[in-house]
Amino acid sequence: MGYMYERVVYYLKEEKCWIVVVPELPGCQADGETMDEALANAEVIIQEWIDTAVALGREVPEPAGKVSFA
């Protein structure tokens, strides 16, 4: 894991997919068919969120430093 942003991971039974939400980065979430895939996709999305915020001159919050799985 690159950044130490909190990640909340859960499974959507009906959709049969895993979701990862990064609460510290509004709107930042990813999915995948497996938990590992969803977490890997989250790493990409976190970087893209940060790159976009920087390009737009927006503040990038410092990670709280905790990682959680729910």
Image (cartoon, rainbow, N blue to C red):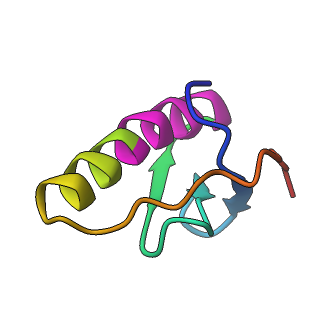
Q: Is residue 17 visible?
A: no
As drawn, is 52 to the left or to the right of 46? left
Q: Is residue 27 visible?
A: yes
Q: Nearer the viewer, residue 44 or 37?
A: 44
Q: Nearer the viewer, residue 17 or 5?
A: 5
Residue range highlighted in magenta: 35-46
As drawn, is 55 to the left or to the right of 45? left
Considering every residue shown, the one lying at the far bottom of the view is: 26
Residue 41 lies in the magenta stretch: yes
Q: Residue at x 22, y 54 (%)?
A: 54
Most frequent secondary structure within the magenta stretch: helix
Q: Residue at x 69, y 64 (%)?
A: 13
Q: Nearer the viewer, residue 27 or 54?
A: 54
Quadrant of the image for the N terminus? top right
Q: How many marks?
A: 0
Residue 43 lies in the magenta stretch: yes
In the image, residue 4 sits, relative to residue 16, either above or below, namely: above
In the image, residue 47 sits, relative to residue 37, either above or below, namely: below
x and y percent of residue 44 in the render?
A: 37, 35
x and y percent of residue 51 in the render?
A: 23, 46
Which quadrant would residue 67 be assigned to in this image? top right
Q: Residue at x 78, y 45 (%)?
A: 65
Q: Nearer the viewer, residue 40 or 15?
A: 40
x and y percent of residue 59 in the render?
A: 37, 66
x and y percent of residue 38 in the render?
A: 54, 40
Quadrant of the image for the C terminus? bottom right
